[in-house]
Image: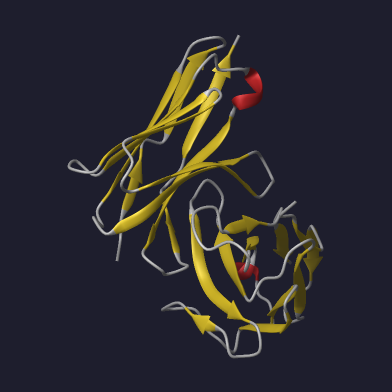
Amino acid sequence: GAVVSQHPSWVICKSGTSVKIECRSLDFQATTMFWYRQFPKQSLMLMATSNEGSKATYEQGVEKDKFLINHASLTLSTLTVTSAHPEDSSFYICSARDDSREFGETQYFGPGTRLLVL
Amino acid sequence: GEDVEQSLFLSVREGDSSVINCTYTDSSSTYLYWYKQEPGAGLQLLTYIFSNMDMKQDQRLTVLLNKKDKHLSLRIADTQTGDSAIYFCAGRTGGGNKLTFGTGTQLKVEL
């Protein structure tokens, strides 16, 4: 149980194009999902908290118009990197909070999406 | 905000015990987690401990928490080559959902 998938697992795109990454909770409902970014050999940095049916909450320094988040259902959140540039190249990881669990192990992580912008 | 620090690298021999350490600054952290990340993959939750506990054991994993010193450790008994990965500790405060991750410790298991 508690599986989170991401699609695509990797993507290469040209500079200036937009890329959409999907995060799905496969066997549980998730009102809240999180998007992280990880640079090589570094820790995870929280970009935003995605809330089903409402606007995402962005961390300081993260451009909301650059990283569009949509959480249209209890099992799906999408992150769209708009007008991608080489500096957006990174490993993007989502996590989902299981609504049925109140404490402890509440966040489950996806396998990540590697984005390379040429 | 919270700062979470870890040593960057640890090398052990197969069969030995590994101890990965983590220090944090926010004393109100109520849950502390250990995650494992293998190359090119997402994070796998290994174990977690509630702040009112001193120790938690789960098969080969033992978590020790020293609240006074704000120090958390993960001990892996009988370390295997498959344990080679990056290990992150993370803290969560109260009812909030946000996790603050440590810098990660790369564990290398040698034959």
Q: Is residue A8 above or below residue B62?
A: below
Q: Quadrant of the C terminus of chain B?
A: top right
* Of the pair B25 and B105, the residue shown nearer to us: B25
Q: Quadrant of the N terminus of chain B?
A: bottom left
Q: Is residue A95 above or below residue B45?
A: below
Query: At 72% from the left edge and 77% from the top edge, which residue is drawn?
Result: A74
Place of residue A99 in the rendered image (x, y in percent of width and height, measured from the top left): 62, 69
Place of residue B41 in the rendered image (x, y in percent of width and height, measured from the top left): 69, 46
Instruction: From the viewer's perspective, tell me whether residue B90 is left or right of residue B71.
Output: right
Query: At 65% from the left edge and 68% from the top edge, which residue is drawn?
Result: A86
Instruction: From the viewer's perspective, tell me whether residue A41 is left or right of residue A109.
Output: left
Query: At 71% from the left edge and 58% from the top edge, which residue is drawn?
Result: A114
Task: Residue A14: name its quadrant.
Answer: bottom right
Place of residue B78 in the rendered image (x, y in percent of width and height, measured from the top left): 54, 13
Place of residue B92 in the rendered image (x, y in percent of width and height, measured from the top left): 40, 59
Query: At 56% from the left edge and 59% from the top edge, which residue is drawn?
Result: A106
